[in-house]
Amino acid sequence: MKLKAAFALAMSALILIPAAYAAEQAKNTDAEAIAQADMAMKQNVFAVQLAVERYKADFGTCPDSMQALADEGYLAVMPDNPYASLWSQAPAKCVEEDLSFRPTPGAIVYHPYTLDGDSLGGYIILGAGMKGSNTSGVFEYDLFYGEPRWDSMKYFMPDGKGDGRPESYVIMLSSPSLTPDMAVSVTHDAAWLNAQPDYQAKKALYAMQLAVERYGVDNDVYPPNLQTLIDLGYIYWPVNPYYGLQGAPLRIPACAPEGFAPGGVIYEPIRFDGHIEAYQMGIFGDDPDGGIDAGALVDGTWHFYDLFEEPRNPDGVPDGLIMVLSSGPAPERCETGT
């Protein structure tokens, strides 16, 4: 009987040992799977950053949202969510979310902000992991002191430390690098800028210039006037951010230099042998006596300063324009004006 009992005990041990081993192996497998998902998530965030940088190179400003990347074709689809196979409630694709203490696994937080109060020159991108990310049973990044807010990031704290409560993010990318004196800057985001009519007007001028350049690519010359772009479907007049101010119309109008209207756009083609090979364009702000000195009277008619004249000879009189864009230095054989 004692031998039978001993044999039974030995057999139960043999059964328990593989079961315990299997549980440990499963735990290790889960940790490995999460680590691989973390790596894939980081690659997703790098891909979003690349799209942001391409957009910034083309437009001179960061996109105001990830949706803007999609609308302009820089990010065709949201990346696959690497945590979807590990957590049943995770969405199949990564999702854009606002900042939070416990974001959805696979969420991407994109936060553009302004450094100069004029354009979106900086950004922060976060990628959210899941419970067990970084294979340590806790979340990798402790980025904030207290409730997650952009101005409470640890980089702005006196000792450069968080609060010891990681917030679930497995990667953070930023441009430029964050420094203690930037706490206010990062709160000046797209919504803050969008409340500024001058910023909206400049965005509208960039949109008009993009339409001009698309016309140039299609036709090998630039358009003779802005109405041509409207008639051929390259763009419709953007909404005027100064609407109602000093009689400004709802849509941005084309203006002659002497016909000031808040939000009005001046377009000046530059010709050679009848072909328009360059251009300058500018947009009025809300003050006819303010803005920048962009041109002067020439034989009684106002023109932009010559693109190829160096040094330029400004008259020192502001022309009401808040931004001037051009096709670049014009060939010297070009003649200014229409």
Image: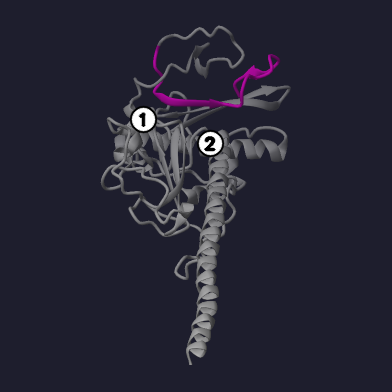
How far from the left and from the top, in percent, is residue 190?
38, 41
The amino acid at mark 1 is Gly
Q: Residue at x 36, y 30 (%)?
A: 117
Question: Magenta stretch containing residue 335, yes or no?
Answer: yes
Query: Which is more toward the observer, 244 or 24?
Result: 24
The residue range painted magenta reads: 317-338
Q: Residue at x 28, y 42 (%)?
A: 145
How far from the left and from the top, in percent, is residue 319?
41, 19
The amino acid at mark 2 is Lys
Tag 1's secondary structure?
A: loop
Dot 2: few (<14), some (14–19), or many (≥20) neighbours within 10 Å?
some
* Residue 295, placed above or below residue 185: above
Q: Residue at x 39, y 13 (%)?
A: 317
* Residue 257, placed above or below residue 189: above
Residue 117 circle label = 1
**Disc 2 from disc 1: Cα separation:** 16 Å
Query: Which is more toward the observer, 241 or 182?
Result: 182
Question: Magenta stretch containing residue 318, yes or no?
Answer: yes
